[in-house]
Amino acid sequence: MALTARALSYAYHKGGALAVDDFSADFAQGKITAVMGPNGCGKTTLSKLLVGILKPLCGEVTLNGMALPGLTLAETGRRIGLVMQQPGRQLFTTSVTEEIAFGLNCLALGQEETDGRVAKYLAYFGLQKYADRFPFELSIGEQQRLVIASVIAMQPAYLILDEPTSALDRGRKDDLRTLLRSLSADEDVGVLLISHDERFVSCCADSVIAMEKGRIL
């Protein structure tokens, strides 16, 4: 499966400045690609275009040769997982366990498979002791780990993470790096990492795209 952006442009207001300007790139499965640049350069807008939350003014995103308008948001979400910069915006169930299980239930997996994945990612992200906790009682860092766990549990072909290390300590960053390398190398997941964390990117990404004013440098 291939994720491709071709000549993408987007503005938030008609006639306004382009937040993304003629962006083209191929994102390989099994590789980690980092997108870096200053605040306001279009990185987050790009992520929303790639998952179909925003519709480009021109250009297109294709997934395995099919333009995203040919897929519903739900269908896109099964193939491309997005972890937003503000984790609270992606939390809506009444417990940590339910949060991870929600997407799996939408996939109509068997109960044994669902329970197994929930247990696996609760353990991997150190969330077992919060299993029955209301997600908004968690710290920002714990919420971030929960959202990442919930998305990864659905085993998407591509994973887009917007500033995933912003609320993680050094140990959790190391855990995340190990997980992303494993996903890309062992499970052939394509990872798009949007980050200001140069140290994390330097030891994690296979390639880097630099953006400024909506364009690739």
Image (cartoon, grey):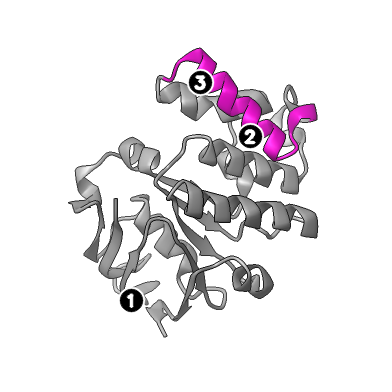
Residue at image location 70% in from the left, 51% down from the top: 175
Reading the image, the residue beneath label 3 is 113
Give the side of residue 148 with respect to residue 28, left or right.
Answer: right
Q: Which residue is mark 1?
A: 21
Q: Is residue 117 in the magenta section?
A: yes
- Looking at the picture, how far across and down is residue 48, in whole percent? 41, 56
Residue at position x 78%, y 43% in the image: 139
Q: Earlier in the sequence, mark 2 or mark 1?
A: 1
Ranked by sequence position, the earlier of labels 3 and 1 is 1
Residue at the (40%, 19%) spot, across then down:
108
Q: Which residues are magenta?
A: 109-129
Q: Residues within 10 Å of mark 2 (few under 14, many from 20)?
A: many
From this view, report whether residue 171 is shown above or below residue 108: below
**Kind of residue sitting beneath label 1:** Asp
In the image, farthest residue toward the bottom:
217
Question: On the image, numbered disc 2 is attached to which residue?
Answer: 121
Of residues 194 and 177, the one nearer the viewer is 177
